[in-house]
Structures are given as structure tokens and as C-alpha cells.
Image (cartoon, helix red, strand yellow):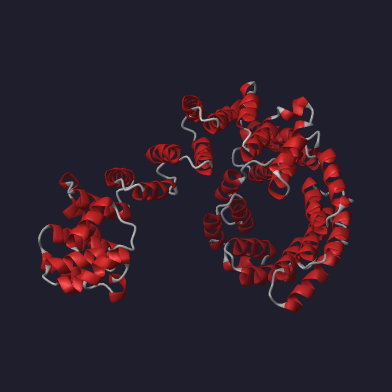
Amino acid sequence: MLVGYAAYQSYTKAKEAHLIGLAHRFMAQSDMPNAVLSLSEVLRMDPQNIEATRLMADCAGATGLNPVPWRNRVVELNPRSMGDRVALASAEMMGGNFALANNTLQQVDPGFKKIAAYQNTAGALAIAAHDPALAEASFRQATVLDPGSLTPQLNYAVTRLHSTNLVAEAEARTGLAKLAGSTNGVIRCQALRELTADAFVHGQPDLALRLSERLLTETNAQFADRILQLVVWQRIGGKKFTAAIADSQTAAAADPARIFELANWEMKYLSPEQTLDWMQHLPLAIQTNQPVALLSSECRILTGDWHGLDQTLAGQNWGELEFVRHAFRARACCGEQLITGMAGEWEKSIQGAGMRIDDLTDLFSLAKQWNWPKEEEDLLWKIVRNYPQEKWAAPLLADALVSGGRTQSLMLLCNLQLEHDSSDIQAKNNLAMTALLLNAQEQRPFILAREVFESSPTNVSYAATYAFSLYRQHKNLEALKIIQQLNPRNLRDPAVAGYYGIILQGNGQPEKAAPYLKLAGLARLLPEERILFATAK
């Protein structure tokens, strides 16, 4: 039995090694689907195979998928590998989760901080944190630790190029010029991009043009590099700029992704009319392609062509973006003052978005862009109710409710926030204040106000709420004692001054109260606050 098991185990390991070798070859040929198939078979046989898991992360990153779960798994399997921990931090950073990346990086052993990969990732995180001095120091250390690697050299030079030190700038240009002549095509292109942008910013359009022309001859050049050259040509002006636009349009004509990129630039820097005219001369199959149809609709909105927008959208189908098409039709109806049609199309849009947070957020952005406050608010309520983790929504909704003077709705929002997170002290404070203003005793405002104050007695807002709570209970002397513990400068804050004024009034000091009640008029007040302070005056 033992001999048979050993032979089977040996066969399995050999098969795993063969499959990993295949995966390496597939990856070298950019054949990621077959690489993933090979690696999946390895992980089926051995879920703890570190190399296969690491390669899965590489495949995910190469195909635009999220590599973080795979990088996390590698660290779980190999917690002592500082290189894998740095790779995880890098993946988290690329995904925009800078706080998590920083936390992962902090867990690296001090000795590993002398490795170039660590310093390179630390430098990139420093840029995300808007700390150019730390970024420059980290990239410089990476170049020292790995002098043969071009990536740290490029990062170091780019960071110094944006320095206020003229000597550092000049040295950075020299370094980038050297990298622009390297044998690494990716590094070479990025160096040329940086030099082109630098020449343009410093008022050297002729130099920028020569550099951009050189960039466009590179195998690794991207379509975005054509647009970079258009920016330069626009500065120079003349017939050649017009010819450059025509050339770019020709180069983009058969590729919806390129059309989307170029049309976005044209809409911003030329005009929506010109952009629409170009897109209307594209082949019909391209015009009805989802990204192109989306941009055409935006152009019609910018030009106010409501009838044309509705007619164009009527016979289309945008697949998973059907909800956006209905939103645009709603905008067309609004432009033509067809209120019933607008309501019907917007309802279809809401139904099409369902409960998907990304789609709801997209609709909210459109409603905000079109200045539709009711639709904005409806979407914010839906997001706050169903996605409490989306912390951006509640403050926007609260701001709209305060602006509209809807204290009752504001109190409901605060209640909802507390239902989702009982530890949200700010929401508890706001609930206490709105309940005090509305005399909503069912919310237990006196208890809430005291709890909030006790959690942070030095917080100005919390102290003001508690003092107002005591005032509502006719405990005027206690209220005065609490609010006078605040810094005199805080008492002159219009948002606090009115409350100080009514508490002074309640303690028989009307003359002292008067200037504070006057200051309250500078604050953004709820209707109940306006009545409260006006009555006191």
C-alpha cells in the first residue's frame, strides 16, 4: 500500500509540474485562457499549491480581473514570504484600496524593506497619499537597491520631474532621455510620454511634437498617444491640426474603444456638434455599438437636440445598459416638456437598474448632472436603505433635506442610519437634535443627547445638542453651564450661536443673547430653528 501511494504521489507531483510548465508557456504566448485551465487542474489536485496560486494571480492581473483574492491566498499559504506580501499590497493599491495596501505593507518585516520591490510599492503608495517627498525617497532607494531595474529609475525620474527644484527637474529630464533610448519598449514609451507632456507644459510645443512623433513610431504606442499629439497640435494650431484630427478619426473609425476615447476628447476640447457630425458619418454598425451610441446621446443632450435624441434611441437596444438608454429617453422627453413620457421612461430606467448599486449610482450621477433634485433624492433614499456601507449617500441626502427644510424627513434618515449602525454617534446626535426641534418624544431625545455628550464632552456639536436638550427640559442653568464650557470662539459659530442665545435668554440675559441670536441668521437653518431664534429675538 505504502509503495503504491508513494508512486501515485510521485505521479501527481510530476503531473502538477508538467501543467505548471504548460501554464508558463501559455502565459509567455499571452494565451491566458489555456494558462488558467492548466492552473485550475493543478489546484484541483492540490489546492495548496503556492506556485499555481501565484500564477493565477498573475493571470488575473494580465486579463484585467481582480488579482487580490489570489494574492491573499498566496499570503495565507506562505505567510513568511515578504515578496508575496508586497505583491498583495501592490495589487490592493492598483485596485484603489490604498488604506488596505498600506496596512499590508506595514506587516512586512523590517529587513525586507531593503528590497527594491518594497520601496517601489511604498513609493507608489506615497504618491497616492500626496506625499511626493516620501515617494521620491522610496523610488531613489529602489534604484540603489536594484540599479539594473528600469522601473524604479523611471518612477524616480518622473517624481523628480514634478519637483520645484530646478536642478532635480533637469536631472530628471536627463534620466528620462536616457530611458527613452533603452531596449525596453514599455519603459521607452512611458519615458517619451513624460518628456512630451513636460515639454508641452513648459511651453515648448515644437519639442513636444517631435517627441510625440517619435512616440507614435513605437510598437508599444497606444491610441492615447495620438490624442496626446492632438493636444500638442491644438496648441500649435493651423491646418495641420485639422489634418491631425482627420488622421486620428480614420485610425479610430473601426474600433469602438478608440472612437470612445477620441470622441470624449473632442467633446471636451472641440465641440459636441463636431463630435456628433463625425460619429454620424461612421458605418451604421459602428454607430449603434453601445459605447458609440452612448457618446452620440451625450452629444445630442449637450446640443439640446431632444427630438433627434429620442428618435435615435427609440430603435436601439443597449443590452446591460438598457437602463441608461431609458434614462436618456427620459431626458429627451424632459427637453421636449413631455412630462408623462419622462416619468414613464425614468421608471423603466429605475426598474432596469434593479438593486445593483453600480447602476443606481450611475443613475444618480445622471440625475445630478441633469439637475433633477427629486430623482436624485429618490435614488439616495434607495441607496441609503439598501446599501448602508455606501457612506457617501447619507450626507448627500441629509444636505438635500436640510436645504429643503424637511426636518421630519431628516429625522427619519438619522433613525435609518442608527438602525444600520448603532455606533454612529453623529447620526445619534442629529437624531437627538431633530427630535428636539420637532418635540418628537417617542425618539427619546433627552436620553440620546446625554449619551452623545457623554461619549465626547469636548465635541462642540454634541455639547450644543445636550445644552439644548437641557433647555427643553427647563434646566436653564445646567444648559448654560454645559454650553459655556465651549471655547468662546465656538460660541460665535453661527451654527451654535443661536442655541447659546436662547439659553442666555432662558437665564434672564437678553442683552447678552441679542448678538448671538443675530449671528444665528448667518447659519443654514431648519424651519423650526428659524422660528425658535426669531421668537427669541
Quarter occupied by the C terminus: bottom left
**Residue 509, picture quadrant:** bottom left
- Give the mark count: 0
Residue lying at 78% horizontally and 39% vertically, measured from the top left: 30
Q: Position of residue 502 (x, y in %)?
A: 18, 64
In the image: residue 137, left or right of residue 502: right
Question: In the rendered image, which quarter is residue 127 located in?
Answer: bottom right
Above or below 174: residue 332: above
Front-lying residue, 273 or 351? 273
Residue 431 placement (x, y as % from top left): 26, 50
Which residue is farthest top? 315
Viewer-proximal residue among 365 and 521: 521
Is there any visible trace of residue 463 in the rendered image?
no
Residue at image point 72% right, 50% down: 269
Residue 263, how many percent across, how many down? 73, 41
Q: Is residue 484 above or below residue 222?
A: below
Determine whether 469 is above or below 159 in the image: above
Q: Residue at x 60, y 54 (%)?
A: 93
Left of 380 or right of it: where is 240?
right
